[in-house]
Amino acid sequence: MSTDVARQTVTIEEVAAAAGVSRSTVSRVVNGSTAVSPEALEAVTKAIADLNYVPNRAARSLASQKTHAVALIVPEDTTRFFGDPFFAAIVSGINSRLSRSDYVLNLFIASDDPGDKTTSYVRSGAVDGAIVVSHHTSDTFIDRIASVVPVVYGGRPVRERERDYYVDVDNVRGAYDATVYLIENGRTRIATITGPRDMPAGVDRLRGFRDALKAFHLEPAGVEDGNFTADGGAEAMRRMLASGARPDAVFVASDLMARGVLTVLNAAGLRVPEDVALVGFDDSPVATSVIPPLTTMRQPSFAQGERMATVLLDILAGRHPRHVTILETELVVRESV
């Protein structure tokens, strides 16, 4: 028996029995209703996952009909989503591609919800596919979504599998080149402010930084996590200075964090680039809004969004796109080195 057939043999009554709730409660959950207690929502969601239940409406949609809607799922809080220019560029790229198709975009910022409402909505058959951006190790609800609709990831998935589709930038090479540029400009005490270690982009940029130092027989002057936010970058720089580290250069794994780093260095009386050189990552509008303008690694976020949407549309059309697409980064030299 195929997996698809096995899924369809599970009934809503079986889910209700496993969850210890009524059939109508299960129906409300799979249709995304908020008129469900937290306890019932948790019980039904667990039963759906355990039984691998696909609602009939979703099964019919996948088999014959199309909603002509796709979900963009961002497991971040609203402050991060609306405050980071990276997301604006990604969404613009996705929307640009979808505007040339019959599909519309549904946005889910899934931070305050552990994925339950989002999962229920997607599993109800309301969308044909999903794009997931900025996912963390803890975002296991994505697996429940991927069991129902095609998913394209923005960035390497946390748990990469052969069947996954994703579009990423070459984070390792970008971080490597950024660090080498600092070394070639005579800097030897080089530190880094990283992104979260539970995100592939944070891990890969740290790896590129370490690889570059190793190639030139240097040791890191400091490593702190800045959480890909301006406040996080500032706090990471404060911790680094408080530890006694005195880097003459810092590779900062996002422009937003670099803005926070600049604030702290200025407050400490350290000049950029005379005392401490900085290289960021993104080439977002932040890079040209700070003083001095930031040398940074440009990642093609708009193009990444377009490509993710293209891959998903190809899958939905029955075509067979490449599973992995890696876009190149480019060093943009300004005045912080």
Image: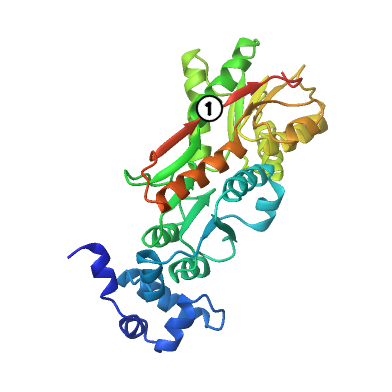
- Give residue 169's position: percent from left, percent from top: 52, 33
Name which quarter of the figure residue 249 lies in: top right
Name which quarter of the figure residue 56 lies in: bottom left
Furthest residue toward left:
1
Name which quarter of the figure residue 238 lies in: top right
Seen in the picture, residue 181 relative to 263 is either above or below; the reply is above
Q: Residue at x 52, y 83 (%)?
A: 37
Q: Residue at x 41, y 78 (%)?
A: 43
| Quadrant of the drawing holding the N terminus | bottom left
Which residue is disc 1 drawn over? 328
**Which amino acid, mark 1?**
Glu
Who is closer to the viewer here, 313 or 52? 313
- Give residue 87's position: percent from left, percent from top: 64, 46
Taking the image as shown, residue 163 lies to the left or right of residue 104, namely left
Q: Residue at x 39, y 38 (%)?
A: 322
Seen in the picture, residue 76 relative to 168 is either above or below; the reply is below
Can you see residue 269? yes
Can you see residue 206? no
Q: Residue at x 68, y 19 (%)?
A: 248
Is label 1 in a helix, a strand or a loop? loop
Q: Residues within 10 Å of mark 1 (few under 14, many from 20)?
A: few
